[in-house]
C-alpha cells in the first residue's frame, strides 16, 4: 500500500490513487442546547420528525471505492457488518461509480450499516502536498467547516441517508507543534459539528491517534470549539480495543462514541470474493437508512403522533401502501406485538399491520429508536438511575460531554427546575437538567413520552 503520509510507528494511513483509502472521520453524536449550557460543546441538535440515530457495535471495513453489490452480498459470510463509504469531499481519492441510492438501500437491506465519510479540506501543515487545504485564517476555516457539513449532508441525503445519521470528517496527519495549524483545524471541525447539529445530524471526526486525536481531545472541554459526537482514530497496531488510547482519556467520547482503524490495507476473502480493506472496530453512530414495508390488513393503518393508540391521529395509509420505516420502539400491545414503527415522514404506526420480518418482536435491520444528546453535568458525571427520580439507586454515571442515548421522556422528581426525566437506551433514567435536549424545563420534540 502506498502511503499518503509518513507512517509513524503504527499510525493511520489513507489510501492513495489505485488503492483503498483508510476510513475517514470518526466519532459522532449529537449535542443540544439543554439546561443552562452556553458553552460551544453543547450546541443544539435539531432532530426533525422522523429522525433517529443508528448505533453499530462490531467489526467494520472500509475501502476507497464502494464494492459491487455482488461482493457485498458475498461478504455476508464475513465477520463484518458495517462498511465505510466516501460520500463527499474535495480530496476524496477514488471515484464512486457504484455508490448510489439503490446501492445504499440494497446493502442496508443485506444487513450492513454504513459509516459515511467526508474527505474534504486537509490541515494546512500536513496531509499530502497536493491536497486542498483548510485556511489558516480562523474565520475562513469556520466558513469552510460549515460548507463541508452542508456538502456531506446533501450528498448523504441524495444517497438516502436520513436525519440522525452520523457523518465522519476525515482529517489526515498534521504537525503537532504548529499552533496556527491546530487553530485552523479545530475551527474548521467546530463549524462542521455546529452545522451538522443544526441540520439534525451527528458529527464524527477521523484522526490519526498520534498526529491529531490528542489535540482534539485536549479541546474536549473547551468553550471555544464545539465538541464532535464521536471519535474514530487510526493506529495500525492490530489491537482492536476502544480503550487505552494514548492521549485520549477513557472518559472522553465514552458512551458508544468510539471507533478504531487498527489494521491497514490488506486483502481478505469471504464468500469467494477478495477485497482490499482496512480493518476497524466500531461502537459509534452510523448512517440511518429507511426500509420499505407494506401495510397489511383490510382497514386503514392510523399514523399517530406517538407510539400508542392514545396519541393523536396524524393521517392514515390504506392496505397495500408502502411505508418508509426508520426505527422501532416499544409501546402498548396491538394484536400480538408491542412494537411500534417510526416513519420517515414522522409519526408512529403499530407493527401489527406492517410487513416487517417479525410479527411479534423487533425486526432486523431496523434499529431501535434513539435520540442522543450530550450530557452537561460538570461534576462526577450524570447519574443513570433505575427510575425517574433522585430516590432511585444509581447504577452508573455518564462522564461530562458523553452521549445520553434518549428513547423517551417522562415526569419525575424535580432537579434544578425541571421534572423531565429521560429514559435511556439501556433502560435507565437520567434527569433532563444535565442533558442538552432542546427543552430547558419541559419536554423536547421529537421525543415521545414514556
Image (cartoon, rainbow, N blue to C red):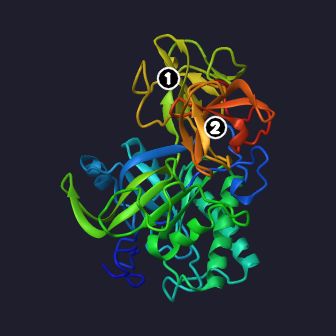
Query: In the rendering, at what x and y percent does residue 292 appear?
Result: 50, 35
Question: In the rendered image, which residue does mark 1 sit on?
Answer: 354
Residue found farthest to the left: 272
- Looking at this view, is 37 or 29 the one in front? 37
Query: In the rendering, at what x and y percent does residue 443 appear?
Result: 75, 32
Look at the picture and state if 327 lies above or below 14: above
CB contact under 8 Å: marks 2 and 1: no
Looking at the image, which residue is at 72% across and 25% down? 413
Q: Earlier in the sequence, mark 2 or mark 1?
A: 2
Look at the picture and state if 191 lies above or below 449: below
Instruction: Report how far apart the C-alphas of labels 2 and 1 lie in the structure.
Output: 17 Å
- Looking at this view, is 398 or 274 the one in front? 398
Query: In the rendering, at what x and y percent does residue 224 appear?
Result: 73, 66
Left or right of 19: which side holds 384? Answer: right
Left or right of 208: which side holds 19? Answer: left
Residue found farthest to the bottom: 129
Q: Residues within 10 Å of mark 2 (few under 14, many from 20)?
A: many
User: In which quarter of the view is residue 93 placed?
Assistant: bottom left
Element under disc 1? loop
- For residue 371, say whether it is visible: no
- For residue 266, say whether it is visible: yes
For the N terminus, the image quarter is: bottom left
Left or right of 389: which side holds 21? Answer: left
Looking at the image, which residue is at 69% across and 65% down? 225
Circle nearer the viewer, 2 or 1: 2
Query: In the rendering, at what x and y percent does residue 362 appear?
Result: 44, 27
Looking at the image, which residue is at 60% across and 82% down? 133
Element under disc 2? loop
Question: In the rendered image, which residue does mark 2 sit on?
Answer: 50
User: In which quarter of the view is residue 261 placed?
Assistant: bottom left
Amino acid at each position: 500500500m502506498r502511503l499518503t503520509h509518513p507512517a509513524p510507528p503504527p499510525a493511520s494511513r489513507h489510501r492513495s490513487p489505485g488503492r483503498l483509502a483508510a476510513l475517514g472521520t470518526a466519532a459522532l453524536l449529537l449535542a443540544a442546547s439543554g439546561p443552562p449550557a452556553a458553552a460551544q460543546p453543547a450546541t443544539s441538535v435539531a432532530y426533525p420528525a422522523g429522525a433517529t440515530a443508528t448505533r453499530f457495535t462490531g467489526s467494520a471495513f472500509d475501502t476507497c471505492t464502494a464494492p459491487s453489490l455482488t461482493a457485498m452480498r458475498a461478504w455476508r459470510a464475513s465477520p463484518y457488518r458495517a462498511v465505510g463509504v466516501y460520500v463527499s469531499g474535495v480530496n476524496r481519492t477514488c471515484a464512486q461509480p457504484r455508490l448510489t441510492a439503490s446501492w445504499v438501500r440494497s446493502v442496508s437491506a443485506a444487513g450492513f450499516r454504513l459509516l459515511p465519510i467526508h474527505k474534504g479540506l486537509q490541515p494546512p501543515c500536513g496531509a499530502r502536498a497536493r491536497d486542498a487545504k483548510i485556511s489558516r485564517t480562523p474565520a475562513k476555516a469556520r466558513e469552510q467547516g460549515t460548507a463541508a457539513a452542508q456538502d456531506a449532508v446533501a450528498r448523504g441525503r441524495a444517497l438516502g441517508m436520513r436525519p440522525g445519521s452520523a457523518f465522519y470528517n476525515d482529517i489526515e496527519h498534521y504537525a503537532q507543534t504548529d499552533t496556527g495549524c491546530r487553530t485552523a483545524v479545530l475551527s474548521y471541525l467546530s463549524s462542521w459539528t455546529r452545522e451538522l447539529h443544526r441540520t439534525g445530524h451527528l458529527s464524527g471526526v477521523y484522526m490519526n491517534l498520534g498526529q491529531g486525536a490528542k489535540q482534539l481531545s485536549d479541546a474536549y472541554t473547551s468553550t471555544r470549539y464545539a465538541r464532535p459526537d464521536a471519535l474514530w482514530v487510526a493506529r495500525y497496531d492490530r489491537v482492536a480495543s476502544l480503550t487505552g488510547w494514548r492521549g485520549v482519556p477513557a472518559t472522553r467520547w465514552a458512551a458508544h462514541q468510539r471507533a478504531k482503524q487498527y489494521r491497514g490495507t490488506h486483502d481478505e476473502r469471504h464468500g469467494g470474493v477478495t477485497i482490499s480493506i482496512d480493518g476497524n472496530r466500531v461502537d459509534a453512530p452510523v448512517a440511518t437508512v429507511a426500509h420499505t414495508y407494506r401495510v397489511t390488513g383490510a382497514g386503514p393503518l392510523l399514523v399517530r403522533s406517538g407510539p400508542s393508540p392514545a396519541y393523536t391521529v396524524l393521517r392514515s395509509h390504506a392496505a397495500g401502501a408502502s411505508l418508509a420505516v426508520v426505527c422501532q420502539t416499544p409501546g402498548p400491545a396491538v394484536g400480538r406485538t408491542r412494537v411500534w414503527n417510526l416513519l420517515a415522514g414522522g409519526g408512529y404506526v403499530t407493527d401489527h399491520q406492517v410487513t416487517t420480518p417479525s410479527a411479534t418482536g423487533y425486526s432486523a435491520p431496523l434499529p431501535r429508536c434513539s435520540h442522543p444528546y450530550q450530557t452537561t453535568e460538570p461534576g462526577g458525571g450524570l447519574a443513570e438511575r433505575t427510575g425517574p427520580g433522585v430516590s432511585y439507586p444509581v447504577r452508573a454515571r455518564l462522564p461530562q460531554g458523553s452521549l445520553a442515548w434518549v428513547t423517551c421522556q417522562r415526569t419525575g422528581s424535580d432537579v434544578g427546575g425541571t421534572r423531565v426525566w429521560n429514559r435511556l437506551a439501556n433502560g435507565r433514567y437520567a434527569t433532563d437538567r444535565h442533558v442538552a435536549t432542546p427543552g430547558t424545563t419541559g419536554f423536547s420534540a421529537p421525543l415521545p413520552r414514556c
